[in-house]
Image (cartoon, rainbow, N blue to C red):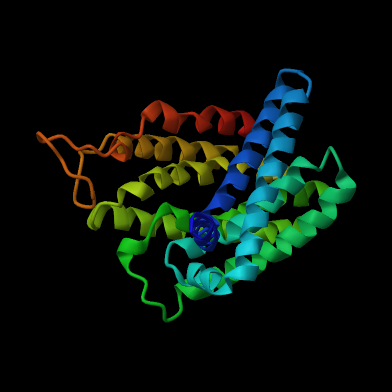
């Protein structure tokens, strides 16, 4: 009986393996690139960045392996993820992780990096168009379903020039780069409308506000790869959005979407107290990478 129960629990965990885990690949690859940029700036060896790169590849491979197993065994669950108004935005995290991996391999293994970049770019284009088509289709999306995670499919296109520029694919890089910047303006407007004029975000989605800081940091490295002078644009956009992120961090508490019971007038949810120092940790890495 216990063996059958254990097997059922393992099957249930696989069936509910979240697509959002691919965001781990984006974060780890971004950390790898930031460490490498810092090592280059301070004339240090690339030992640490190479170790983090190996760890990032292992973690991404593990996540991909589990999700492929889920797709083979429970294809209906993958379809459910695709039709979910929030989870659908994380499917392009697969291609973005591969694009960042290709960028990390440009100097290490260019023979692997270029075909990987070509595949990831094509996959990013397909997934971005598919998700955007779903957004503007006939699905019952509501304003409350809007989160900063929606930046991933469309705005994530600005990652393409990081490796596309060095490989000489300038026109393709400009295509994705300009499209990402355009959708950044559009989606930022929609997200600000949702945050200001609608119900507070659920506690589990509050950490996604850090995504608002990321897009203004992205244009500078791709801009360098495309020989574009984008430093004033980056500075003028990243500074106010960093201030905006801090203002959301210290907003008055709201228990409208909190499922935990409150005692003595104090909220027991730890998500509400997501610490500012933790939120600020990625910023120096992003700035070093930008430099």
Q: Nearer the viewer, residue 197 or 263?
A: 263
Which residue corresponds to the image point at 76% horizontal and 52% vertical from the top-left? 164
Residue 169: x %, y % from top left:
80, 56
In the depicted structure, whether residue 128 falls above or below residue 58: below
Q: Residue furthest bottom?
A: 138
Q: Nearer the viewer, residue 195 or 127?
A: 127
Q: Residue furthest right?
A: 111
In the depicted structure, whether residue 255 falls above or below residue 280: below
Give left or right: position of 72 versus 134. right
Which residue corresponds to the image point at 70% horizontal and 52% vertical from the top-left? 98
Give left or right: position of 92 versus 191. right
Q: Quadrant of residue 118?
A: bottom right
Which residue corresponds to the image point at 76% horizontal and 31% vertical from the top-left? 50
Residue 189: x %, y % from top left:
38, 57
Can you see residue 184? no
| Figure label count | 0
Can you see residue 271? yes
Q: Residue furthest front?
A: 1
Q: Quadrant of residue 139?
A: bottom left
Give left or right: position of 212 versus 250. right
Give left or right: position of 105 versus 111. left
């Amino acid at each position: 009986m216990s063996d059958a129960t254990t097997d059922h629990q393992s099957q249930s965990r696989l069936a509910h393996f979240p697509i959002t885990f691919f965001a781990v690949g984006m974060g780890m690859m971004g950390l790898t690139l930031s460490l490498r940029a810092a090592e280059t700036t301070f004339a240090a060896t690339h030992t640490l960045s190479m170790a983090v790169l190996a760890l990032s590849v292992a973690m991404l491979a593990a996540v991909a392996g589990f999700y492929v197993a889920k797709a083979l065994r429970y294809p209906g669950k993958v379809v459910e993820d695709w039709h979910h108004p929030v989870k659908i935005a994380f499917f392009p995290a697969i291609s973005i992780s591969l694009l960042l991996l290709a960028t990390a391999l440009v100097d290490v293994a260019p023979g692997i990096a270029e075909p990987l970049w070509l595949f990831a770019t094509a996959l990013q284009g397909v997934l971005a168009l598919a998700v955007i088509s779903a957004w503007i289709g006939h699905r019952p999306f509501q304003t409350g379903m809007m989160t900063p995670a929606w930046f991933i499919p469309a705005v994530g296109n600005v990652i393409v020039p990081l490796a596309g520029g060095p490989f000489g694919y300038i026109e393709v890089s400009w295509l994705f780069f300009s499209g990402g910047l355009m959708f950044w303006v559009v989606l930022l407007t929609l997200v600000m409308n949702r945050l200001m004029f609608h119900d507070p975000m659920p506690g589990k989605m509050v950490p996604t506000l850090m995504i608002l800081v990321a897009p203004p940091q992205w244009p500078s490295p791709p801009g360098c790869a495309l020989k574009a002078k984008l430093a004033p644009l980056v500075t003028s956009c990243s500074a106010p959005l960093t201030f905006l992120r801090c203002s959301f961090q210290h907003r008055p508490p709201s228990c409208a979407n909190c499922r935990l019971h409150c005692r003595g007038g104090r909220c027991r949810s730890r998500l509400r107290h997501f610490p500012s120092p933790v939120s600020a940790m990625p910023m120096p890495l992003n700035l070093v990478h930008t430099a």
